[in-house]
Image (cartoon, helix red, strand yellow):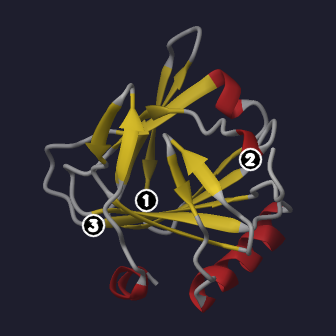
Amino acid sequence: MFTQLLAELPWQAETLHIHGREITVPRRVCWFGDPGAVYTYSGVTHQPLPWPQVLSELKHKLEAFTGARFNSVLANLYRDGNDAMGWHADKETELGQNPTIASVSLGAARRFKLQHNRAKTVVDVMLEPGSLLLMGGPLQHCWRHSLPRTREVIGPRINLTYRLIKLGGP
C-alpha cells in the first residue's frame, strides 16, 4: 500500500498562514473525502478530492474495527527526517467537540510525541509501519502532539489521518 500511495496520490506542497506569516509546510499533503467534507486549518481550506479505491477500502476496515465513522482522510508524506509536524491539537470546529482520528502509519517508523497541556508531561510513541493510533475523547483538548524532525537517516513515511468532518458547517 505504501508503494502504491507514494506513486499514485497527488502530493502537494502546502503553504500555511501562522502568526501572520506564510510558511512552507515541511511535508507533502493531499485531502480526500465525501462531497462537502471541507477542512480548514491554519488559514488553508481543503476541498476533498474523490476517494481513491485503496483509501476508501481502508476507511471501511477502520470503521468496522473502531466503531467510528469517517468521511475524509488527510494524507501526509514525510519524505525524510527533515519533514515534520509541529506541536498542535486538532480542534477545528468542523471536527466537532471530541473528534475521533484514526492515524495509520506506512513506511519508515517515526517517533510521535504527546504533551499534556497543564502538566507538560511528554509521552513518546514509536509509530511502526502498519500501526494504528486512535485518538479520541477529550485528547485534543488536554494534549498537543507533534512529529519532530530527526537527524537519523530515515526513509519516507506516509501517515493517513481519517476524520469525520461535520457537513454543512460547524
For the point 19% across and 49% down, the residue is: 82
The relative height of residue 136 versus residue 163 in the rendered view (above or below) is: above
Using the rendered image of the protein, determine whether residue 113 is visible from the camera's viewpoint.
no
Looking at the image, do the residues carrying marks 3 and 1 touch, with CB atoms under 8 Å apart? no
For the point 66% across and 22% down, the residue is: 142
* Residue at image mark 2: 94
For the point 36% across and 73% down, the residue is: 11
* Residue at image mark 1: 128
Work out whether mark 2 precedes mark 3 in sequence or the reverse, and give the earlier one: 2
Looking at the image, do the residues carrying marks 2 and 3 touch, with CB atoms under 8 Å apart? no
Work out whether mark 1 precedes mark 2 in sequence or the reverse, and give the earlier one: 2
Left or right relative to 145: residue 37:
right
Left or right relative to 154: residue 63:
right
Q: Which of 45 and 9 lies nearest the eye of the viewer?
A: 45
Question: Farthest residue toward the front?
Answer: 20
* Residue at image mark 3: 156
10 Å crowding of disc 2: few (<14), some (14-19), many (20+): some
10 Å crowding of disc 1: few (<14), some (14-19), many (20+): some
**Rounded to the nearest whole Å, what is the CA distance between mark 1 and mark 2?**
29 Å
Q: Which of 15 and 137 lies nearest the eye of the viewer?
A: 15
Nearest to viewer (mark 3 / mark 1): 3
